[in-house]
Amino acid sequence: MTALELRDVGKIYGSDENRVVALEHATLSVADDEMLALLGPSGSGKTTLLSIAGGLLSPTSGRVEVGGQDISAFNASQLNRFRRESVGFVFQQVNLVPFLTARENLMVVDEISGARSGRASAGRADQLLGELGLAERGENMPNELSGGERQRVAVGRALMNEPRLVLIDEPTSALDTQLGNQVMELIRQEIKERGTAAVIVTHDTRMIHYCDRTVSIVDGVLRDDAGASAAH
Amino acid sequence: MTDTDDLTDDTGVCRRGSTTSASAVRRFGARYGGRCISASVVERKEDVFLAIRELARAKLRFILLGGAIGLLVFLILFQQALLGGLITQFIGALRNQSATVLVYGSDARRNLEGSRVDPSTVDAVRAVDGVADAGPLGQGTFTARADGALADATLLGYRLGGPGRPTSLNAGRLPETDFEAVVSDGDSSKGFTLGRSVTIEPDGRAIRIVGVATDARYSATPTLFVSYATYEAARTTANPDAGPITPSAVAVTVDADGDPGAVAGRITAQVPGTEALTRDEAISSSPGVSSVQQSFYVILGLFYIVVPLVAGLFFLIITFQKADTLTLLRALGARPSMLIRNLLAQVVVVVLGGVVLATALLAGAAQGTKSIGVKVDPTAIGVTTAVVLGLALISSLAAIRRVLAIDPLRAVTGKDVLG
Amino acid sequence: MKLALRELRRRPSRFAVAAGVLTLIVVLLSFLGGLLDGLFLGSTGALSAQRADVFVYSANSRDSFLRSRIEPDVRAEVAAVEGVDTVGGLGIGLLTAAVPGQQDPADVALIGFEQPATGIPAPPPDGQAFADRRLETAGVRVGQTLEIGRSRTPIRVVGWVRDSNYLLQGGLWVNADTWRATVSAARPDLRVADGVMQVLVVSGSGTPASLAERIDAATAGATRSLSRDDAILSIPGTKEQRSTFLQIIFTTLAVAAMVIGLFFSLLTLERTGLYGVLKALGSSSRQLFGGVVAQAVLVTVVALVIGEILTIGLTAIAPSSIPIELTASRSAFVAVGMLAASVAGSVVSLRRVVRIDPASAIGTSS
């Protein structure tokens, strides 16, 4: 089963003279437990692709399927539900809630979906934190954590709802090589253990060897790592 | 890149260079007034316009603030006018008559209604040093028949030609004989008009209205200034069981260079059974006036505190929220005085806008409360505006301090989420 | 919603501003309400206490208590009306009383009555009176003999009653004969003949309106009868005071709504980033807005509690000449008003919350 299927997806911003073509004829397939690296420079459209795959944006054209579900024409509240249940995000800016502890930052996912409550939710949060090497840091506020620790909390949050697909935006851009390796190691571990698929957007070539496959994107067009256009 | 890039405005995010090198600063967008502007725009000298543009962009919050301040100022103005109007309703007649000293009975508790003096007191008072003239003053509330209908009326009887005559005549003339009256203004709808007659129930003689005076009501009822004899006749008519009728007080005018306060003191000391008050003392100690005043002052005080608090805190908060932008502007060379000028300009615009709203509401309210006599007084509005503006500007000091505390060298990081 | 409450708990300082201003507004409203009630009760307590259905005034008194006179023959006519159970006379004279040991005389409303009323037992013997608690602040004590008016008529205070005042003067309740004699002595011009009372308090069967009609018909228009509520409202100044004060109170509530709208829209603006992230995690606008409302309501509740405490403190130290009466029902009124204002004010933020785009959580360069 494919976790993610993009077929001829296009995204255009603006109109007429101010048209910006962010994505063009993007076609991509990610298998259920595959870890894909999406490589590209600034302005290449990789964030747009990530946003569409995760149901944060709707495509202008084409088809998007996640775990067999066609989300191309979902309305806002359907996308909301989809993100709640099927997708996990790790943002480049991490975006932890500053007045919640690390544990509570994970538990907030359950609060939103109502999936688990109280003790059950705390239990799962602690389990994830333990796997990420943050067992002792559950009670700390984000401003008491180091950059790498915050990154790991964000990874935990992305996994709380047991998603089909995890989308990660530049996980190592703010980390040094050692920390970067640590984080990528953990991500790979978690992904493979759970059989979740992951798309990792990055321009950091040091880290792509953690992934199963690399796809490049330049000016809105995908190319596989063989260099040929992935349009067909 | 054009001068004004617009991106997901309401979530407040502008493009940023992914590095902080000098060239990126050139591409660095700053969020000001909801729109992203590039550095070149800031370099242009657009002082106060920036402030107005921010106002125009963030209409809702400034309208809310202006609305809140407008309502508050309206309530302040309204209550001040109400207080003034109410007090005039109760003691306008006392204020607008010729006696500068009023002598009450000593156990009247400074209340004209409950006051009684012997007729002989009048002569005793006249004999006191500094008194130019003294005459009896009779006050009573009666049921009167005017224009066929019954109405409350207050009679103030004085010795014709002597102290106690009305001083705010705006039509007609003073009474020259018994059964003629000057009536307080504003009661013509009830039949108290110039030229007509009223009778004191039951079946008294007709009293003809020969003059009208402004702000001459007593105790919030239509008031008739009549001769003392007329007053006595009215008392007898209204209550045939009544015994001998005595004056309520003695009305006194003072020698040309005399001091009413000193004369009043002398009268109280020398004439037994009396308490003499100057006209102003009589007014402020009239029953209900002082307690009404005190109550209103407390409430007005609270309102006066709320206004600058709301304004000051609002501007403090938005200054904090703009900290990033302000830091950028300083980094690009804007002087603190420019930023402070903008802030003060906004305070002034909001307060003045609120005052305009308040005046409009006050005009409407004045229509609706004609009976209590709420008037739109430009002086009062001017004074209140000045006070409120002053308070608001003072309260923005906190925001100004925050602006001055900006260190342009400080790096700016995201505010509400950490990463 | 739990998230919103946790934010309140963890970061109270952000909400302190709104809470502070709202507390002031609560104090304002409570004060205004207390003043309204104090003035109302102080003016009308004497009539409110009567257990009558109808008050009967003389037709030419224009519903003024003080000028009304009911002769014995008219009274007999009223008593004979079908459906009338009890008829009692009531008379009020506004006089001053010298209080032993006090320099200033007290303003009293000398009330002659025949029928007991709420909180007021049967008329005392000649020369004795029940005094309203209000007179306690003027130095009056049980057992004292007060001297009424210039004639210094002695009257001994034998007990207390409450909320029985008229036109802000302390009620002094005596039997009809004592009342007549005292008024005639102190104010000869207001002398009332034997058997005459100012107003009759009548209780009977049927609706007050129909009873009033029957009575006026029976006396051939010599009387004008009013139901209790109408009689209370006809006391000079009551109606205007009430409507003016209520207008001021409602306008102040509107201000409260605007203040909440203002401060919470600023707060929402600060949190657009946070809301973007939460929406990216799948939170709905409804959940987020519910959180905003919950915070507004809770901040208002805090303001209500602190405001009430401050008000009680303020009225305790206020000079006694200011007639303030704090009642539970008025506090409830203020509370309901403020809570409604808080919900209305938070609606201002609704549009912005709905418009926040979850894609903003990613918001950097593409």
Image (tube, helix red, strand yellow):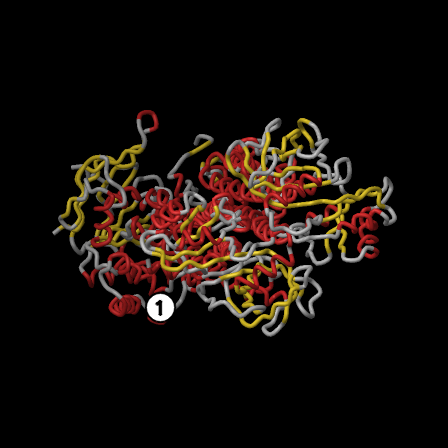
At 65% from the left and 64% from the top, the residue drawn is C153
Direction bottom: furthest residue: C143
* Quadrant into which the C terminus of chain B falls: bottom left
Q: Nearer the viewer, residue A97 or B332?
A: A97
Residue B360 image position (x, y, % from top left): 52, 33
Direction front: furthest residue: C73
Q: Which residue is mark 1?
A: A138
Direction left: furthest residue: A1
Task: Name the image quarter holding residue C95.
Answer: bottom right
Mark 1 surroundings within 10 Å by alpha-carbon count, few (fewer than 14), some (14 through 19), many (20 or more): some
Chain ID at mark 1: A
Q: Nearer the viewer, residue A176 or C215?
A: C215
Residue C353 image position (x, y, % from top left): 35, 46
Q: Is residue A208 visible?
A: no
Q: SS of the residue at dot 1?
A: loop
Residue type for callout 1? Gly
Residue A208 image position (x, y, % from top left): 28, 53
